[in-house]
Image (cartoon, rainbow, N blue to C red):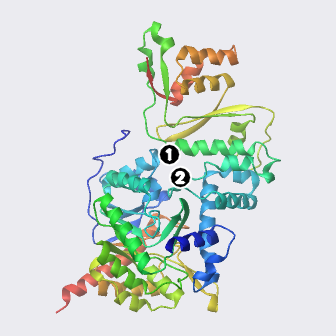
Amino acid sequence: MLLDLQRTFRNTVAGPTDDAAALVTTPRRLAIYRNNVQKSLVDVLSAAFPVVQRIVGERFFFALARDFAVKHLPDVPHLSVYGAGFPDFISGHAETKTLPYLSDVARLEWLRGEAYFAADALALDPQALAGVPAQSVSALKLQLHPATRLMQSMFPVHRIWAVHQLGDGDIPAVDMSVAESALITRAQYQVTVREIDAADAVFVKACAKGENLEAAASAALATDEGFDLQGALQSHLMNGTFTSFSL
Amino acid sequence: MLQDAPANLSSSSPIPVAAGVGLRLQHMPLLASDADDAPLRAAWLELHSENFLNAGGPRLAMLDEVAVRYPLSCHGVGLSLGSAQGLDAAHLKRLAHLFNRVKPGLISEHLSWSVVDGAYLNDLLPLPYTEETLRVVADNVKHAQDVFGRKLLVENPSSYVQFTASTGPEWEFLSRLVDMSGCGLLLDVNNIYVSATNNGLDAATYLANIPVAAVGEIHLAGHSVDGEGDDQVLIDTHSTYVCDPVWALYAETLRHVGVKPTLMEWDLDVPAFEELQKEAARAQVLMDRAMQGVAHAP
């Protein structure tokens, strides 16, 4: 009985039916609950995807986010993890076809959020790495920091994201023909996003899969024979990409 | 601060019988950056549990700082005590982990529901007050109290509709829930006013029928007014100052229920922390007056 009532109520506040009207004394006020449910979820998405909202405008974003929300209600009550499916929803949406890069921008924003809420860990200390004997270096495996995320895109996803951080002025034009990879992590409590080249992205991906340094480096070299392992490692150590290593 | 196990960061501080302030994310940098020996900006703080259930990051780090200095209570908005399908075991576990981390002086939830068939609606939805609902909520409250190993305060909701299936008033439901589950009550004075006004009930009658011994905490907040005439409805927005009739009802509550820890809530259009301090100070004046009244009684 109560379960039936709750299902009916859900279908009215998050769906198209008015069946709950028969259950209450003031049916018109069901609109208040409908608004609370739908608007609060749109607000969560709007906070998680500010660049997407800026690109498509507030009105279009509201419609898009509400469409997503009623089709994909949260499966947990803590909404810091709500919106994981929004990038895929955008790429499958008929009305965003003219903005093919939009879902990757959403993905980048989502990964930034994941990095913000990820578990704490210390960044790998370069001194510890310096103590590894030369003959063992090729066998060492680098462990990604829990906040590290890799984004590989056919579009200049980092550049698009970055120009939308510049404030309210005119957005500079971006050459959409460039493919980009972005690396997100959180050194201490500050989330950082930086562009990395395609070979470096392959390197990080190989490390994430548990490949050792030699295998990861040769995968990167296969992508770009100019891959500079030393330089890449240095900037990863500076940015906190890794948390530990094993031999 | 970077260990996985959050134990021993703070010991449990009881919530003082004083006016506290709701802990909002935008005020956390201010509260977390105060020196250890700086004067407290509020007698105690109440957090929304669901804001702090992630694995790590700056928000939890700031919470650890705040928890060292302030008595904290944990107020949940997502346990859905009214769910016909029972409580979400994973959510209970996450909450227990948070309580272990911040050692709250009080824990509370709402008389409402928000999830069915695994889909969360992110609102505090109303319940029909029937024998079946009473069994469901009492079982859920007992389940939560077993998991947490302590008493839960249950808050009276604000509502915009009543179910025709209800067989009795909300106050009677709460009274029987206290008897059946051993829970305490978090009496939200604004919610009494909002629900009574919206549903044509008498707030004084509501208050007079509350089991006063069960009340462990009081909430105050502002609401907004929507529509006109017969269409007028009060919306529990927590977006503004407490209105005069709610202040009057609060003074009456202090006389009838006694002086209890009182929290000032403000969730939307959140102003500077100083504004919340001023509202809390207004509540504190009424609490002090009520305490003196008791002391001077013959």
Of A114 and B165, the residue lying toward us: B165
- x and y percent of residue B3 in the render? 36, 38
- Horizontally, residue B121 falls left or right of residue B170, namely right
Name the image quarter holding residue A208: top right
Task: Read off the residue under disc 1.
Answer: A117
In this orientation, which residue lies closer to the viewer: B178 or B8?
B178
Q: In this view, does B137 lie to the left or right of A211?
A: left
Q: Are marks 2 and 1 in contact (CB under 8 Å)?
A: yes
Residue B17 placement: quadrant: bottom left
Total numbered badges shown on the rendered structure:
2
Q: Can residue B116 be seen in this view?
A: yes
Circle 2 sits on which residue?
Answer: A80
* Other-residue count near label 2 (Cα within 10 Å), few / some / many at <14 / 14–19 / ≥20: many
> Which residue is found at the position 68% from the left and 47% from the top?
A87
Q: Which mark is residue B281?
A: none
Q: Where is residue A63 in the image (x, y as percent from the top left)?
A: 73, 61
Residue B87 in the image: x percent, y percent?
A: 43, 61
Q: Chain for mark 2?
A: A
Q: Residues within 10 Å of mark 1 (few under 14, many from 20)?
A: many
Q: Which amino acid lies under the numbered mark 1 shown in the image of this protein?
A: Phe
Q: Which residue lies furthest to the front in this view?
A: A1
Instruction: Please state if A38 lies on the left or on the right of B54 as rendered.
Output: right
Of the 4 image quadrants, the one containing the C terminus of chain A is top left
Labels 2 and 1: the sequence-earlier one: 2
| Residue occupying image coordinates x 57% and y 57% | A74
Quick check: B266 above or below A201?
A: below
**Which of the 4 quarters of the picture holds residue A6?**
bottom right
Judge whether A118 appears above or below A74 on screen: above
Q: Is mark 1 on a helix, strand or loop?
A: helix
